[in-house]
Amino acid sequence: MPALTKIPEHYPIQFETNWRQRVQAKQSILKEYVTLDSIAGKEKSYNFLEAAVMREITTRAGETTAQDQESKKRWNRTKGYDAVKRFDEFDDALLGAIVLPDSDVVISHAAAYKRKCDELIAAAAVGTAYTGEDGVTSVTPTQTVAVNYVETGSAANSGLTVAKLRAAMFKLDDAEVDEDEERFFVAGPKQKEELLRTTELTSKDYNVVQALVEGRIDRFMGFKFRWTKRTVVNTSTDIRSCFAYVKSGIVLSDDGLKTHMDILPTQNHALQIRSVARLGSARVEEEKVVVVYCDQSP
């Protein structure tokens, strides 16, 4: 007896009752590796004394002469950021067996907040800082490694090279950055790929500490590496601004993420989920940050 031909029309279609998060960075890559602060107000200045210099005494019982010691300010200004999602009052009922993704929205807002922290840190490291009594004098990075830097031979644009890492290390050493402070290097996925192709890094004879562990570069040349796409890229030249630094060289002001869930009577009682944060980041000491420019064009 032949099978009933109409039966397949009655096969049920199964739908997931929960929601999945699309691929995204859910954790901050940089936040725990900078100096955290809180600002009461819209801005804050950080005060620094230049290094003192000992002077030779050349006369017996001579007149005491006071020495001037220069001081500087660096400014950090915060801005507000938010992420908002609204659900119609009937969404919960009309979704049927599928749960309302309110908790998933909160999770996605938290991930967005962490990514924003990384964006601000990376932008502060390589961008304009502000100094002066009123915080209006702009300062561009003074410690840089050029995109065409080579140790020998003709200069030519390149990605991240061991030579550039050595140059960044030298600049921190030459500035007498405290060796007790852990050093970090922040770059993008393309730079990681470039280093993985470098013979010097993959040779156990050359790198006794084995910077490559299961294909993941962690530490090399005194730097702990952090990989993130949130570093600044010049879209017209495809040059990425990577950077080497120590924790005390960059400040992030963060009062934390706050999430509000409200019913809005004036919006037909829609459910609104709004997450807000006030954030600001600044490069506070030029000597403690080195910007390394990397060409990542094909």
Image: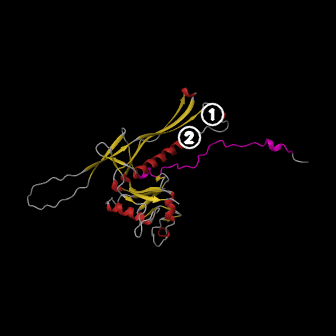
Which of the two labelled residues, at mark 2 and mark 1, occupies the earlier sequence position? Answer: 1
Residue projecting furthest to the right: 1
Figure disc tally = 2
Which residue corresponds to mark 2? 105
Magenta segment: does it hold 29? yes
User: What is the x, y in percent for residue 269?
Assistant: 57, 28
Residue lying farthest left?
61
Render colour scheme: secondary structure
Quote the CA–CA distance across marks 2 and 1. Answer: 14 Å
Viewer-proximal residue among 157 and 62: 157
On residue 91, the disc is 1
Quadrant hosting residue 79: top left
Q: Nearer the viewer, residue 150 or 243?
A: 150
Q: For residue 18: magenta? A: yes
Q: Residue at x 34, y 54 (%)?
A: 286
Whether residue 221 is visible to the viewer of this picture, yes or no, is: no
Element on which disc 2 rests: helix
Q: Amino acid at mark 2?
A: Val
Position of residue 31 measured from the top left corner of the image (x, y, whole percent): 44, 50
> Which contiguous range is marked in magenta?
4-33
Q: Is residue 68 left or right of residue 254?
A: left
Q: Residues within 10 Å of mark 2 (few under 14, many from 20)?
A: many
Quarter where residue 11 is shown:
top right
Q: Can residue 206 be seen in the rendering of this structure?
A: yes
Q: Is residue 205 above or below residue 68?
A: below
Element at label 1: helix
**Residue placed most toward the observer, 270 or 239:** 239
